[in-house]
Image (cartoon, helix red, strand yellow):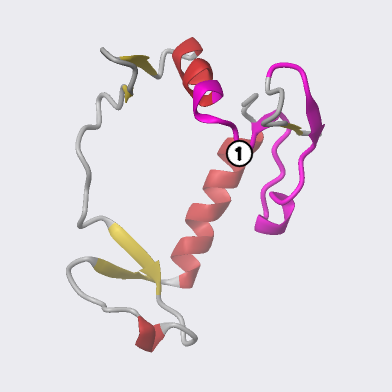
């Protein structure tokens, strides 16, 4: 069973994870939820995901991927929102079946992770 780290005392307090199951997610490890910026920075630095730069901002290490990909935005095309999305170069349509496959791969990947 996953635990949810409390923002008030992220190092020692944990409560049962709630909210993720409604999204189809059932993690088995520790879940960090709504943590304060300093606590997030500490965790990221411990995991070698970035550093603190001069004067304190956190700089994430995204290597080998860099920059943003504004043309890689996909939206599930379905009847309820078909007319509300500006389809084109920025909003690429994604079939519901394709989304389901991606979602299933993601949930399998995250379910086996400790954090």
Q: Which residue appears at 33% of the width and 22% of the height? A: 57
Q: Position of residue 94 (x, y in %)?
A: 37, 68
**Judging from the image, what secondary structure is the residue with disc 1 in?**
loop
Q: Is residue 83 within the magenta segment?
A: no
Picture coordinates of residue 103 (x, y %)?
A: 53, 54
Residue 66 placed where, x, y %? 21, 32
Classify residue 32 by image quadrant: top right
Which image quadrant is residue 54 in? top left
Question: Which segment did they paint magenta?
Answer: 11-39
Query: Which quadrant of the figure contains the N terminus?
Result: top right
For residue 55, side relative to residue 26 (left or right): left
Q: Residue at x 67, y 55 (%)?
A: 24
Q: Residue at x 51, y 16 (%)?
A: 42
Residue at numbered disc 1: 34
Q: How many marks?
A: 1
Q: Residue at x 38, y 68 (%)?
A: 75
Q: Is residue 109 left or right of residue 20?
A: left
- 83 is higher (above) or lower (below) than 66: below
Along the horizontal axis of the image, is 34 left or right of 81?
right
- Residue 78: x %, y % from top left: 46, 81
Is the residue marked by circle 1 packed among few (<14), some (14-19), or many (20+) residues within 10 Å? Answer: some
> Which quarter of the rendered picture does the C terminus lie within?
top right
């Amino acid at each position: 069973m996953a635990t949810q780290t409390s923002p008030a005392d992220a190092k020692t307090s944990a409560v049962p994870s709630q909210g993720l199951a409604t999204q189809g997610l059932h993690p088995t490890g520790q879940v960090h939820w709504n943590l304060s910026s300093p606590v997030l920075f500490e965790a990221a630095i411990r995991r070698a995901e970035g550093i603190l730069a001069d004067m304190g901002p956190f700089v994430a290490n995204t290597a080998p991927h860099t920059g943003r990909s504004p043309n890689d935005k996909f939206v599930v095309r379905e009847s309820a929102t078909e007319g509300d999305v500006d389809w084109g170069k920025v909003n690429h349509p994604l079939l519901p079946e394709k989304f389901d496959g991606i979602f299933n791969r993601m949930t399998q990947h995250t379910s086996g992770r400790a954090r």
